[in-house]
Structure formats: structure tokens, C-alpha cells
């Protein structure tokens, strides 16, 4: 019995001595989280504002209604011109300029932070008299999943529905 206890204690001591006492963990990232998110916000803003003709957003407010397309031209001054002709405006082309911003949340977030009559109709909770408090249930804030010169992939913060932005081709207009 004493031999078993001695053997067990010896093995436990050997295992404990073989582990490292180093308390530091090597850095996984080259920079702090705050600096990395700030760099991402700048980079994604640059991508949005650098499309010469703007972007076409393919947007679904919820899973029950048809989608809508928006032409969005982002400017470096923080404004965005949004144009659309969809079912919410009887397919008549409307456009309006409002403000956008890239903010840090649980990652980079694109927010359309001033009311735009063309776009916010889908996220306005009072717009639908049959669904007061819900409206169409759409988003106006989007987590940026990917942002490159040829594609921007967004995910709605509220609905988690994916919205896709593609650059508007040369010669095409909102009409």
C-alpha cells in the first residue's frame, strides 16, 4: 500500500514539475483589438466610398416580403444618397440623401443613422398600421461580414438577414 502511495505521489510530482511555470501567452494578433477595429472601420468606409458609381444593395426586410434593390452612393463627408423604385413606393423612383457611419460594436457595423424616407420605411416600426411597433421588421444597422471592392456582405443586426452590395456598373443609373 505504501508503495502504491509513494509511486502515485512520485508520478504526480513528476507531472507537476514537467509543466511550465510561464505565465505569459504569446500574442496572437500584431495589434490591440481597439486598433484593429479602428483600422477595419477606416478600411470599410474607404471601400464604400470608393465605388465610382455607387453600390446596388439587394435587401430583404424579412422572410415574408419580396426583396428590394437600392442604389447607394456613399460620400466621404458621411452622406449617402439612396434611390429605389420598389413595392413600398409603388415602383416610382425616389431618392434621398441622409447620413451613414461605420461604428464599432461587436465588430464593424454600418449604420444608416439619420432617417431616410426611401430606406428606413422597412425598419420604421410605425409604418404598417396592421403591425404597429414592428412595421416591416427590417434593419438599418448591419454587421460588415466582408468588404472588398467587388462585394460587400452585410448581416442585419436585428434580423440576421444577409444584404449584398455590388458595385453599380459603368453607364448604369438608379433608373
Image: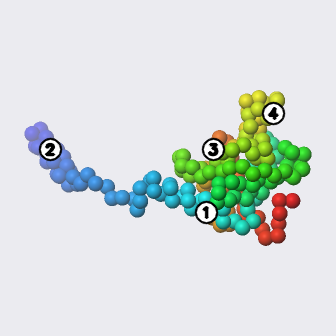
Q: Mark 3, residues whose alpha carbon is within 10 Å: few (<14), some, or many (≥20)?
A: some
- The label on residue 162 is none
Q: Position of residue 30 (x, y in %)?
A: 40, 62
Determine which residue is flagged by label 3. Answer: 157
Q: Mark 1, residues whose alpha carbon is within 10 Å: few (<14), some, or many (≥20)?
A: some
Q: Mark 2, residues whose alpha carbon is within 10 Å: few (<14), some, or many (≥20)?
A: few
Nearest the viewer among 153 and 92 is 92
Is residue 154 visible in the rendered image? The answer is no
Picture quadrant of residue 166: bottom right
Q: Position of residue 96 (x, y in %)?
A: 78, 50
Q: Position of residue 106 (x, y in %)?
A: 53, 46
Compare marks 2 and 1 and give the one earlier in the sequence: 2
Q: From the viewer's perspective, is 34 left or right of 126?
A: left
Q: Position of residue 28 (x, y in %)?
A: 39, 59
Disc 2 vs disc 4: Cβ atoms closer than 8 Å? no
Determine which residue is flagged by label 1. Answer: 46
- At 75% across and 51% down in the image, what residue appears? 97
Q: In the image, which is nearer the foreground, mark 2 or mark 4?
A: 4
- The label on residue 128 is 4
Could you give the CA–CA distance between mark 3 and mark 4, rounded to whole angstroms? 21 Å
Determine which residue is flagged by label 2. Answer: 9
SS type, badge 1: helix
Amino acid at each position: 500500500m505504501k508503495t502504491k502511495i509513494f509511486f502515485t505521489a512520485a508520478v504526480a510530482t513528476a507531472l507537476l514539475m514537467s509543466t511550465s511555470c510561464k505565465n505569459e501567452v504569446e500574442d496572437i494578433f500584431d495589434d490591440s483589438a481597439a486598433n484593429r477595429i479602428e483600422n477595419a472601420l477606416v478600411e470599410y468606409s474607404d471601400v464604400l466610398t470608393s465605388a465610382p458609381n455607387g453600390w446596388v444593395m439587394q435587401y430583404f426586410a424579412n422572410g415574408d416580403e419580396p426583396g428590394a434593390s437600392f442604389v447607394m452612393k456613399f460620400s466621404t463627408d458621411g452622406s449617402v444618397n439612396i434611390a429605389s423604385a420598389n413595392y413600398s413606393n409603388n415602383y416610382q423612383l425616389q431618392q434621398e440623401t441622409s447620413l451613414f457611419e461605420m461604428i464599432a460594436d461587436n465588430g464593424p457595423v454600418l449604420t444608416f443613422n439619420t432617417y431616410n424616407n426611401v430606406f428606413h420605411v422597412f425598419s420604421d416600426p410605425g409604418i404598417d398600421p396592421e403591425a404597429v411597433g414592428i412595421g416591416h421588421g427590417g434593419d438599418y444597422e448591419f454587421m460588415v461580414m466582408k468588404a472588398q471592392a467587388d462585394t460587400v456582405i452585410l448581416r442585419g443586426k436585428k434580423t440576421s438577414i444577409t444584404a449584398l452590395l455590388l458595385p453599380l456598373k459603368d453607364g448604369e443609373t438608379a433608373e
